[in-house]
Image (cartoon, coloured by chain):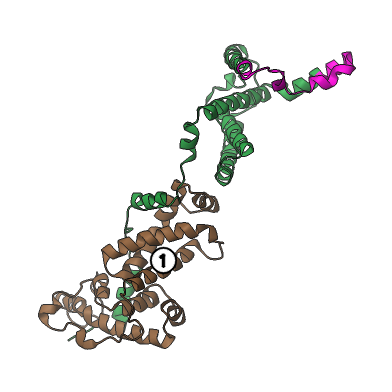
Amino acid sequence: MSQLSEEQLDQIVAVERSRAQEPLNEWRTIAARAREEGLIRQEIGQRWSGQPWMQAAAAVLLLVGGIAIGRTTLGLPTANQTQAVAATATSTSRPAASTQTDAPAGFNFASVDEASTALDRAVREYQTASQYLAANNVSVRTRDSAAIYTARAAALDKIVNATESALQTAPHDPVINQYYLATMGARAATEQLVARPVALRGF
Amino acid sequence: MPFDQLDLKRAIAGDERAMQRLWSQHAPHIDAVVRRLCGDPELAADISQEVWMQIFRALPSYRGDSQFGTWAHRIAVNRTLNALRKIRRIAKLEIEIEDDSAITENDSDRTFVAESIDQAMGKLSPGARAVFVLHDVEGYTHIEIGEELGITPGGSKSQLFKARAKLRKLLAHLVDESSTVAGKGNGHVAAL
């Protein structure tokens, strides 16, 4: 009976070693097992989408992020700057009352309903103001090129990745959640800026 | 798409997409090792599931000291060999000596001889197949094989010698068929 030489067998083995082979199972089979063992966790998108309060919080942060970006782009003073100016003015006119103006605005609400009403009003005002500025403000900074917003969006994508990763480490941590949602809001606002014609950027 | 550190962190945290990327990238090689060691495709598929579960369970312990593929490959080999031991397929590994008389020589049996290396390896004893796969295909040293299988390096060499001798006979028809077409003595193996 004939047989292969050692070299011929080595050739066959080399072919075998380099031969691409299909996986033995489909991913869904592996995933089902992993899910049973708790190795796969519910996706972040699904986790958040099932919680209305978190959706509301995301909307608020989207709003805040959009306002901040819009103001920055327009060169308008930010909320902090406005507060600082107001505090300076107040301290000039009424030095004794300056400490009260530094208190967070939320402390002025008497109830959750009152805060919710104020929030709804702010959303409506924001939308109205955005529409007005988009239609009437032509003195935007034309030097803000699409490249700036694109770069910002790319940078925000990295932050989103980082915060997503952090969220998986501490899924119920409110601080991490806040960072994540704020970043998502800022990214969404930036994407709007990227998509918007140059003359309309800056809200 | 390369599997980067961020993907690894996500997979550890249970992100299915990251885990799937890891699996997609490494399953062809990992599963091939399992298949070669098992011989039986159905058994290999079952063991492959266990291997991947073990890889995912052990992800947090991966420190990046070696390539991820190398690390996962080790798990695959260990898990597969353990599974095979459990079903007593290589229980007689240390004492089993290949009996050449068991090799099918006659024409009727020869019709069942594998036409590929996969099938030919299936004709080897589990122990000899493990040594052959680990040494010749996966590049393990005899010392490493000895540690994996609990045998001496000398035992590993002996098993390899016998495995190769058997495979040279089992696969001889590839040369015979090639010679019939292209003429004898060309010294090359027909394409598998």
Q: Is residue B9 above or below residue A140?
A: below
Q: Which quarter of the figure has residue B108?
A: bottom left
Q: Which quarter of the figure has residue B166?
A: bottom left
Q: Quadrant of the C terminus of chain B?
A: bottom left
Residue B147 among those drawn in magenta:
no
Q: Main secondary structure of the magenta part?
A: helix
Front residue of A7/A133: it is A133
Q: Which quarter of the figure has residue A78?
A: top right
| Residue A133 rendering spot, x and y as whole percentages | 61, 14
Question: How many neighbours does mark 1 have within 10 angstroms: few (below 14), some (14-19), or many (20 or more)?
Answer: many
> Can you name the residue that lies furthest to the left here?
B108
Q: Is residue A17 above or below residue A66?
A: below
| Residue B78 rendering spot, x and y as whole percentages | 42, 70
Q: Colour of chain B?
A: brown
Chain to which the residue tagged by mark 1 belongs = B
Q: Colour of chain A?
A: green
Q: Is residue A202 above or below residue B49?
A: above
| Residue B123 rendering spot, x and y as whole percentages | 24, 76
Disc 1 is placed on an element classified as helix
The amino acid type, in three-letter code, at marker 1 is Ala
Residue at which label 1 appears: B76
| Residue B2 rendering spot, x and y as whole percentages | 48, 54
Q: Residue at x 22, y 79 (%)?
A: B170
Provide the residue span drawn in magenta: A87-115
In this image, B9 relative to B105: left or right? right
Q: Residue at x 76, y 21 (%)?
A: A83
Does residue A78 appear anywhere in the picture?
no
Does residue A201 appear anywhere in the picture?
yes
Q: Is residue B74 above or below residue A48?
A: below
